Amino acid sequence: MLNSVVACTQQQPEAPTLEPPKMVAIPNIPFLTKESNFIYVDKISLKPLTNQPYKSASLFTPTGFAIVVNAENEHAVIDEREKKVLDFTSSEISLDVVNGLTFYKKQVEYEKKMPFWKWDWNILGGGITKVQTYRKIEVGVLETKQIILQDDAPYLEHSYYLNFFPIDENHLFWNETIYKIKKNRLTKVEGHIIDLLENKRYIKNSGGQFSVYELPKKKVLHAGLTGTETLSIQLDQETITLPEVNKDRYAPEVPKLLVDRKNGDVYPFPQYEKVFPKRIAKATPSQIDFLKKTSLVYSITNTPYFLLGVFNYDDAVWAYDWLYIDTKGNVLDSIYADNFKVLDQVGNIVWPDRKMILPNAFIDKGWKFGKINSYSGMFNLYLIRIENEKEIRTMGLWNSRDQHWEIKPDYHDISVLDAE
């Protein structure tokens, strides 16, 4: 989840700098004692490291840090020699490792007494609430003790997650901001980013106009783009106009069609990397009829093709029929592209659809289907949500190549820890 508050970087040159650990397997593991405490031991010999007991203890990260909790429920971070890196605190601590750096988040909730003009008055006589729940958060880099963000705000206003995303070995994306890594410190490169794209590209919005940039030099690829739901394509002397393309119930932050008003070029979602053809070069009469009813146009990334969808509501099933068109304007019934998948803005599968993934011959009577997910590295595996005749909702993992359930749909939830 991306958050609306822009991160600020605080430089603290006076803070002590840790020696950056190498990404190695740490031999020490937490061991539960007879006294119901944890100590760290060598995972081969089980020899204790220091015999220091903890109420709770985590595994070490590949960079050599672990979270421990003492008897007072205070959290701290230690290194592989059990030396405290972050001292015990009432704040909860979480860690994540990206590009060889260890990011931490400290968070604590507390009740703050408010001035009288911010009291919550219950007009039904339930009394006056004079306090409000606040959340104090700090995010930083363990190796250099650099603080990336500090915030102290009402509980419902701001949320931050350790979801740093590596763009390349020298750049990270987090909290609508791109950072450059140099000597294990982060420097802000660009902020107010509303969407991160492939191939080091990103989108910014200024006054309702969108621009596409490329790292590392912040090169502007396209500027002054605006959103549209209307798409026109020329067929000989006829102009075919599609009035509601990619119509959403709720308008997305970045429109699914971005148009350059200067030359009429239209760049479709998801990567906005190529221009939809302005003229049909080749199509059969039936393909033309299909095109005139098209309501979904997505770019198929890393190919010269676009996906064309016509909504087909049949027997309470939401589905699409599909055709394709290439950048030269040739309409096609099928294409040759290896293992491609098309996802919507929240990561659900658009293509291939359920019937392609799980044919009707393999479904039980009365099954209805929800969203289908697949992640990079899963290839022919799909997480499928099912509702049976008794309206019980479950989830399973289907292998579309071998046509069988790797995990039968008997579970309320399945989480992917490692896609490969």
Image (spheres, rainbow, N blue to C red):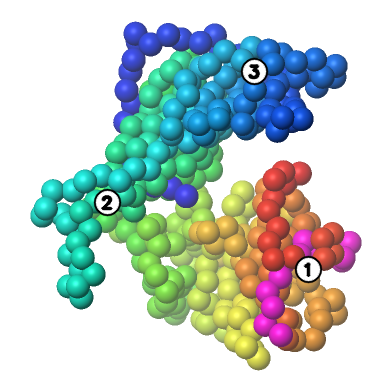
Which residue shows up at 62% across the image and 60% down it? 342
Measured along the vertical axis of the image, is residue 305 above or below residue 230? above
Assess whether mark 3 and mark 1 are in contact (beta carbons under 8 angstroms).
Answer: no
Q: Which residues are magenta?
A: 390-404
Kind of residue sitting beneath label 2: Gln
In reply to whether residue 400 is colored magenta, the answer given is yes
Local packing at callout 3 (Cα closer than 10 Å; few below 14, some 14-19, many 20+) is few
Q: Is residue 309 left or right of residue 228?
A: right
Q: Can residue 287 be seen? A: no
Q: Which residue is mark 3?
A: 52
* Front residue (pair 324, 163): 163
Kind of residue sitting beneath label 1: Asp
Q: CA distance from mark 3 to mark 2?
A: 38 Å
Circle 3 sits in a helix, a strand or a loop, which is it? loop
Q: Which residue is mark 1?
A: 410
Q: Quadrant of the C terminus?
A: top right
Q: Mark on residue 132?
A: 2
**Mark closer to the chain start, 3 or 2:** 3
Which residue shows up at 17% across the image and 65% down it? 121
* Front residue (pair 105, 84): 84
Label 1 vs label 3, nearer the camera: 3
Circle 2 sits in a helix, a strand or a loop, which is it? strand
Measured along the vertical axis of the image, is residue 84 above or below residue 304? above
Assess whether mark 2 and mark 1 are in contact (beta carbons under 8 angstroms).
Answer: no
Q: CA distance from mark 1 to mark 2?
A: 42 Å
* Front residue (pair 118, 38): 38
Label 1 vs label 2, nearer the camera: 2
- Residue extending farthest to the bottom is 315
Q: Is residue 420 left or right of residue 137?
A: right
